[in-house]
Amino acid sequence: MNDQIHVAIAVLYRQNQFLMQLRDNIPGILYPGHWGLFGGHIESGEVPEVAVIRELQEEINYTPPAILNFSCYYDEKVVRHVYHAPLTVELDHLVLNEGWDMALLTPQQVLQGECYSAKAGGYKPLGAPHQKILLDFIKLEPYS
């Protein structure tokens, strides 16, 4: 029996920066109080490409003009189906419906593994799998 959770997440990029969500600081969720990529659980019978678009609409009221497959990351608990797309609107056009905060992170901030959040009142770490995904993405530069 496969107990892994399947999620679809998106690397959204704009002007060499990457949109990230500061996850709520709630016990019981994966990576509470950490920066992560937007996206979420794939529903029963749903394909990952549809799930990621649905999740982006639910979480930040954004539908990308196109979404492309990047890769798939596996660990003992989660299978992450990763997509990428340009962020074609300014941050103030997005509506944060899930999470504590959101920000555009530079490649340097991704490498450092933390980013400041005024809403959280300090620097918060990137979730390890999300940092790895972004570092892999930056190396390949498919968004340039």
Image (cartoon, rainbow, N blue to C red):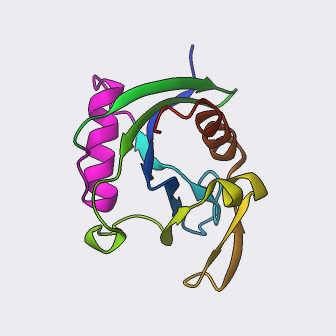
Image location (x, y in percent) of residue 19: 47, 57
Q: How many marks?
A: 0
Q: Residue at x 65, y 34 (%)?
A: 139
Q: Judge from the rendering whether residue 101 lies leftward or rightward of residue 58; answer left or right.
A: right
Residue at 57% x, 61% y is 105
Residue 142 visible here: yes
Query: Which contiguous range is marked in magenta?
Result: 42-64
Image x and y of residue 142, in percent: 49, 31
Q: Nearer the viewer, residue 21 or 75?
A: 21
* Nearer to me, 92 or 58: 92
Residue 3: image x %, image y %? 58, 24
- The answer to whether one can see residue 126 in this image is no
Using the image, determine if residue 71 lies above or below residue 24: above
Q: Within the magenta stretch, is there residue 46?
A: yes
Q: Residue at x 64, y 66 (%)?
A: 33
Compared across the picture, whether 1 is left or right of 61 comes to: right
Q: Farthest residue in the top direction?
A: 1
Image quarter where the N terminus lies is: top right
Q: Nearest the camera: 95 or 6?
A: 95
Q: Is residue 38 above or below residue 91?
A: above
59 above or below 129? below
